Amino acid sequence: MATLPNPLPSLATSGLQLPPGSLVDATIDGAWHEPLLWCADEPASHGTWRSLRAAGRAVGLLPVLIDGGRRDEWPDTWDLIPDSTSYPGDHDAEEVLSEYWEDCAPEELDAAEGEWPGLAPVPAAEGQDTPDDLAAAIAEECVGPDGWYPGSRLALVPARRSADIPAAIGWSGPVNYEDDTARLCAVLRSWEDRFGIRVVVLGFDTLTLSVGRPPTTLPEARAVAAEHFAFCPDNINQNPPYDLDIYAEKMVLDQETWSFWWD
């Protein structure tokens, strides 16, 4: 069954003014029984994210930028697996992270660090912008010829909260690490609540988040780095000489974007 009971509304009657694009229903098992998302045909332009977020929310759609990457792969070739994706609300974020930690941390960290440290606290400092405003600002940095993801296209996904976007389309980017993306989305929900994250960019196996309330002290950042390691060990294992302390200082402390890549 579909992971979330929130089917894509009829775009023809939604009133949205959309650029040329197409509905995506292609999955690893063939055509899905309903479209999973709408994706534009051309790279996104400045201002599109903000305008479509405001309009799309009224009909249950949230924006995300889709990155084709160096392999020029778009959602119709992503091996989406909605039939194997559960519901994020059925999972507990700390249980998920602690299970991941137990599987990978003892082999990668010394014995003194081997015990799951628990969830990081909510940062003491508030962010400069609201999470939605920051997400729109980060999206602006991503698009355009000089953007971080210059060829990225705007997509609209039927999701009630940004953290659910990967599960809503049955995204399989982390399949070599976790084959039920809803478990990762349970963590994203927790980060949404604690750190004000929003899902801004999805690639074939990459994820970029805006962070509305990032850690502002090294102890806060170190606690979050442990969660990142459990969530996506490749962020550290594939980036030597990173360890949790270096990663916390360079990639988490005061950072308004978090990025992940699964091998």
Image (cartoon, rainbow, N blue to C red):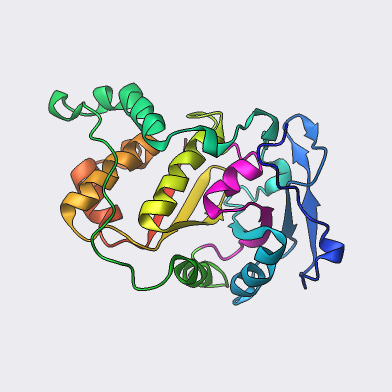
Q: Is residue 174 visible?
A: no
Percent coordinates x, y for residue 72 in the rendering: 65, 51
Identify the residue at horizontal 59%, vertical 73% (top origin). Answer: 50
- Residue 81 or 262: which is nearer the viewer? 81
Q: Is residue 2 above or below residue 56?
A: above
Residue 45 located left or right of residue 13: left
- Residue 2 or 155: which is nearer the viewer? 2
Percent coordinates x, y for residue 32 in the rendering: 79, 37
Q: Is residue 4 above or below residue 30?
A: below
Q: Where's the N terminus, which quadrant? A: top right
In the image, the segment drawn in magenta is 149-172
Residue 51 falls in image quadrant: bottom right
Percent coordinates x, y for residue 259 in the rendering: 42, 51
Q: Is residue 7 above or below residue 21?
A: above
Outermost residue, bottom side:
47
Identify the residue at horizontal 17%, vertical 54% (top origin). Answer: 218
Residue 94 falls in image quadrant: top left
Identify the residue at horizontal 32%, vertical 38% (top origin). Answer: 229
Outermost residue, right side:
12
